Image: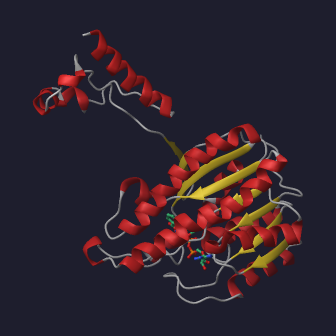
């Protein structure tokens, strides 16, 4: 049996921690010895309004359980002030959980520029802004755990969520590069695509599903990915209702055309079955894995 994972003395910044998943993370870390900066703008599910109530309530809950927490009410779009609040209150940052989010769903042909930009600003730019402000702190101390929150909508697409899907898969791209850049500095960066009953999903899930998909079922994976003994970095995980699974890319063996320079569209059609055949698939995990294939094809071209 694994000993209880502790976070004593660690400073955890959690964005959007006033409700749903973020609140569950905040209560967990507060109960396991961490100092928690509970950030939440306190707006509605579409990003309207703001209030100090959500963050203050969670801070009071953590303190009532004997934990240490402070509230911050800034938007993630102003990431620097959130990290500054953590430095001011607790002196450092060890763990950053980018979680804040809103929805502005609409089918693409009806989507306004504002719906598009607002979602990218909160999810993609907001996560960038907070992480960018925390990054020098983590680099200087040679330690950090950073989590990004993607979504099945980003990975697979979902009707009515073009803005959200673009932002959510963008976060995975950001996480991939930060995992590479952070590795030598002890900074591990992972991404989750959670499913949980919350005010974001209560309009699309049945009351039974909302009750079954408790945010608390996502928190254990988040806790492990943020623990100092976890070596995982650059991972993408689906998690919810007691299910945790890791995703990876898959690529067909493809086809290398002899004399690639003379390649015609008809050649592509003639080899379409091989190009799209996953029966002997590979699992590329680094950009070099792409270069290797392309350079192999160009060497083949030069030798013909
Ligand atoms: P929630 O609505 O319960 O909590 C999100 C919190 O973020 C709210 O308290 C809100 O006030 C806060 N927030 C919104 N904009 C903010 C901003 N600009 N600055 C600071 N705080 C802000 O939603 P939930 O479900 O807990 O979602 C958490 C994250 O998980 C989001 O990023 C969401 O997109 C993602 N997610 C959730 C899924 C689910 O099934 N609940 C599915 C896939 C992804």
Judged left or right of residue 74, residue 301 is left
| Residue in view at x 49 percent, y 34 percent | 287
Farthest top residue in view: 303
Viewer-proximal residue among 269 and 1: 269
| Residue 246 in the image, given as x and y percentages of width and height | 53, 43
Judged left or right of residue 213, residue 135 is right
| Residue in view at x 64 percent, y 77 percent | 75
Residue 45 seen in the figure: yes
Judged left or right of residue 79, residue 281 is left
For the N terminus, the quadrant is top right
Viewer-proximal residue among 245 and 263: 263
Name the image colouring. Answer: secondary structure
Viewer-proximal residue among 96 and 5: 96
| Residue in view at x 54 percent, y 74 percent | 198
| Residue 118 in the image, given as x and y percentages of width and height | 47, 76
For the C terminus, the quadrant is top left
């Amino acid at each position: 049996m694994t000993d209880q994972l502790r976070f004593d003395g660690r400073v955890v910044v959690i964005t959007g921690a006033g409700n749903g998943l973020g609140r569950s993370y905040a209560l967990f870390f507060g109960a396991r010895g961490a100092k928690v900066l509970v950030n939440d703008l306190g707006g509605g599910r579409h990003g309207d309004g703001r209030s100090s109530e959500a963050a203050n309530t969670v801070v009071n809950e953590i303190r009532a359980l004997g934990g240490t927490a402070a509230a911050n009410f800034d938007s993630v779009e102003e990431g620097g002030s959130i990290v500054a609040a953590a430095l001011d209150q607790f002196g450092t940052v060890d763990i950053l959980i980018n979680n804040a989010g809103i929805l502005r769903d609409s089918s693409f042909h009806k989507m306004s520029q504002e719906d598009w930009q607002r979602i990218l600003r909160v999810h993609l730019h907001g996560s960038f802004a907070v992480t960018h402000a925390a990054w020098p702190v983590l680099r200087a101390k040679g330690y950090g755990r950073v989590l990004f929150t993607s979504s099945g909508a980003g990975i697979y697409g979902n009707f009515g969520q073009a803005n959200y899907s673009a932002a959510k898969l963008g976060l995975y791209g950001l996480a991939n590069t930060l995992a590479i850049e952070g590795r030598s500095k002890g900074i591990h960066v992972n991404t989750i695509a959670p499913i949980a009953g919350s005010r974001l999903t209560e309009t699309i899930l049945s009351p039974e599903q909302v009750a079954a998909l408790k945010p608390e079922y996502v928190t254990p994976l988040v806790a492990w990915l943020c623990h100092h003994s976890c070596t995982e970095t650059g991972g993408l995980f689906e998690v919810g209702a007691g299910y945790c699974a890791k995703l990876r890319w898959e690529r067909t063996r493809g086809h290398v055309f002899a004399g690639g320079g003379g390649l015609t569209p008809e050649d592509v059609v003639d080899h379409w079955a091989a190009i799209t055949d996953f029966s002997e698939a590979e699992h590329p995990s680094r950009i070099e894995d792409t270069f290797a294939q392309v350079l192999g094809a160009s060497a083949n071209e030069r030798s013909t």
